[in-house]
Image: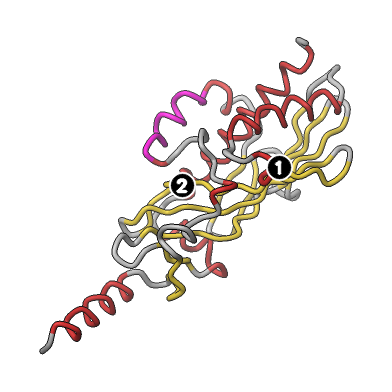
Amino acid sequence: MNVINVKTLALYAISLLLLPITTNAQNNVNGKRPDSVIISRLPKLGNASDILRNSRSNIDKEPKFLVTSNGFSNTQNNKRNFIVYEFTGLKASDMKFSIISKLTTMFKSPKDAIHTISDNIISVEGYSSNVFRYNGYSCDILFNLTIEFKDGKIRYNYPVIKQIYVDSGVIGMLRLDSSKTFQTIAENNNEQIVANYFNSIVSDLNTAAKTSDSW
């Protein structure tokens, strides 16, 4: 058997191990991820236990996102696809300003990640590395989070996980089957890790919103 056939069989075997990953490999240098929306300071998988430990005092007292094999849920009202937090006495415009200021510190290129939909609605497009592991491989996620503001209230709609990328190491970044996102997360018991990840983001943003009356 020649060298070319050996390499071909090796790559084929690796691709089977990575199922249900698609065969659309991403460029491992320039096309690996949209650099303009890489989150630089949000929690990463390696610190998942620390995230939960450090944020527990805040997160345990607040409504939370939950992740199941069927998608997102929440501890406030699972019949709604969003969570509302109360901020008595704070203006919508002030909280929006504070949260945008906080988000600006999280992204390498905030102008590409934070979008104003209307006076009281913003959309966050984020790419996060090493959020969880799938069959031993590190997973990145591309997501969207929409946040709405009213005087005294902030609404976080369920995050939309647009794509999960797996770092195969050998053949670069591969995309998981986007029609099975939550089944894939649940398959390796990553529901709590993914939920903690988004809850930690919300907790950090809420902390920023609470300081909006200190200017």
Name of the residue lying farthest toward the left: 1
Residue type for callout 2: Ser
Image quadrant for the C terminus? top right
Q: Which mark is residue 60?
A: none
* Colour scheme: secondary structure
Residue linked to disc 2? 129
Q: Which residue is mark 1?
A: 114
Does residue 113 appear left or right of residue 92 in this picture?
left
Residue 54 in magenta stretch = yes
Instruction: Classify 41 as above or below 144.
Output: above
Circles 1 and 2: CB atoms closer than 8 Å: no
Q: Is residue 162 left or right of residue 111?
A: left
Image quarter of the N terminus: bottom left
Span shown in magenta: 46-56
Along the line of sight, the residue nearer the viewer: 148 or 127: 127
Looking at the image, residue 123 lies above or below residue 29: above
Q: Eyeballing the image, is 40 above or below 34?
A: above
- Disc 1 residue type (three-letter): Ile
Give residue 209's position: percent from left, percent from top.
73, 23
Q: Main secondary structure of the magenta part?
A: helix
What residue is shown at x 53% (from left), y 62% (from top)? 181
Position in image of residue 178 (x %, y %): 55, 67
x%, y% of residue 127? Answer: 55, 49
Viewer-side residue, 143 vs 51: 143
Q: Nearer the viewer, residue 130 or 5?
A: 5
Residue ID at (84%, 19%): 90
